Amino acid sequence: MIYSLDKINEMAEGDEDFINSVISVFLEEVPQDIKDLEIAIENGDYENVYKLAHKIKPNVDLLGMEQSRAVALDIETLGKSSENKEEIEKKFPLLKKDINQVISELKKDFDF
């Protein structure tokens, strides 16, 4: 398992509806954000690369996905300059793979 509910559980203080809501929002928003980020990278749209990586970061952080958060932060930082295209293209597949794995695990673990 590459995610952890520790942060969400701490925030929720036992509120199952809150936990399900956070997971539901993650499952609704993050897959589209990853698709949009991939398109922005392909198109060399670095402003959106920066914005989308910035948007993904707190979502993966909430689920305790430290490696994904670090990669999203790297992509966000690298997105400030078109000179970093090659490095962004190296890092993105790792972020995409981890997020897709967590999406799959969350759907299985929470019957979404």
Image (spheres, grey):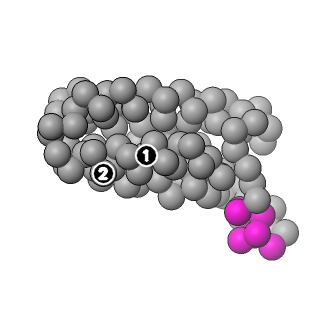
Q: Is residue 76 left or right of residue 101?
A: left
Write the start and end of the magenta stretch as one range: 7-13
Residue drawn at the location 59% of the way across and 49% of the way down? 66
* Side of 111 relative to 94 (left or right): right
Q: Are marks 2 and 1 in contact (CB under 8 Å)?
A: no
Q: Which is nearer the eye, 70 or 108?
A: 70
Examine the rendered structure and indicate whether residue 19 appears above or below residue 88. below
- Does the magenta-highlighted stretch encompass residue 71? no
Q: Earlier in the sequence, mark 2 or mark 1?
A: 1
Q: Which residue is mark 1?
A: 72
Give percent across and percent down for residue 28.
Answer: 53, 44
Residue 40 position, x and y percent, is 25, 35
Residue 39 in view of the camera: no
Quarter holding residue 6: bottom right
Q: How many residues crowd mark 1 within 10 Å: few (<14), some (14–19), many (20+)?
A: many
* 87 to 77, vertically: above or below: above
Which quadrant holds the C terminus?
top right
Q: CA distance from mark 2 to mark 1?
A: 9 Å
Amino acid of disc 1: Ala
Q: Position of residue 19 (x, y in %)?
A: 73, 59
Residue placed under numbered mark 2 in the picture? 77
Q: Secondary structure at mark 2?
A: helix
Please tell me which residue is depicted at 33% across the width and 49% down the height of the picture: 76
Task: List the single residue furthest toward the right.
Answer: 14
Q: Could you tell me the amino acid type at mark 2?
A: Thr
In the rendering, at what x and y percent does residue 16 appear?
81, 62
Front-lying residue, 28 or 50:
50
Element type at mark 1: helix
Residue 8 falls inside the magenta stretch? yes
